Amino acid sequence: MKPLRQFDLNLLLLLEALLTECHVSRAAQRMCLSQSAMSHALNRLRQQLDDPLLVRASNGLKLTPRAKSMLPDIRQAIRMIEHSLNPPEPFDPARSERCFTIASTDYFEAITLPPLMQELQQSAPGIRIQIDVIAQDGNLKQLENRQIDLIAGLDNRQQIDPQLIRRQWHNEPYACLVAEQNTLVGQQLSLQQYCQLKHVLFSDLAGVTSDQIDHWLVAQQHQRNPIARTVNYMAGARVVAFTDAIMTLPRQMALLFAQMLPVRLISPPKGMPQIEMITLHHPLYANDPGLQWLLQKLHQ
């Protein structure tokens, strides 16, 4: 048996054409080659396979027994190669039963997930969403091993492994929460008032969200007076409800807590930067039709 590497695979399609047509000119026409080029290919094939393949008979060229036995396998091999080279099948969310795992922030889980699931129940009822935590290392290994499909909601200032694909997802202004009975503040905070109040700080992975506000304050020679730091928006909002402290968080989160807890919204100092949130996925699966569909849903 000859090793495959000794066979010129460029001749495989020409071999199939020759054996199917049993005619050099027709095979050449089918493969868009000259007759002389196809004759040269036939001679090379005869040498490599040590078989005449096509032999002149009374009514034209005929296949040798070996050529006849080879033809079905050659056709199957070509079909398999073509199938492998074809683009992946389109993703059909209406019929899919895929489970997507998303490592996310509180914001994504509280604000984005409920309406997303409402829509999926109508348009893609078989699809399931599983929420996971964002790890300190940014879930690089989980993304690479496909234990996690996507990270959603991280602050754009977060230091992330550069090989991951980062996409801008959502920008949102901040709002401040205070207890309903808090009479120390009105509806709008000045920068001086903001810094004089007690604060409950929120930190996502590595404290980036909180740092963004603090860096902005430092640039203006100000700083906050924290009494607590939390990694959960709900916990921070509950602390605010029982104290005279304030908390700065994305406006939609603040609106949600104002419906659930005895807290109210006030406007932060003018000029405070917005939070810029991103999605992350691994380049290994960038062309996965299902992941592309999910990203499109989130970026809508």
Image (cartoon, rainbow, N blue to C red):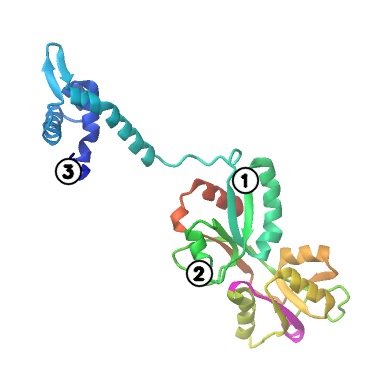
Which mark sits nearer the N-terminus, 1 or 3? 3
**Mark 3 secondary-structure assignment:** helix
Q: Residue at x 19, y 30 (%)?
A: 33
**Residue sitting farthest toward the top:** 58
Q: Position of residue 23 (x, y in %)?
A: 18, 21
Question: Dot 2 corresponds to which residue?
Answer: 160
Residue under label 1, please give it: 127
Image disc number at residue 138? none
Q: Nearer the viewer, mark 1 or mark 3?
A: 3
Does the image show residue 225? yes
Residue assigned mark 3: 6
The number of numbered discs placed on residues in the rendered structure image is 3
Q: Residue at x 69, y 41 (%)?
A: 122
| Element at label 1 | loop
Q: Quadrant of the N terminus?
A: top left
How far apart are the two marked residues, 2 and 1, measured between alpha carbons? 29 Å
Q: Nearer the viewer, residue 190 or 244?
A: 244
Q: Residue furthest front?
A: 1
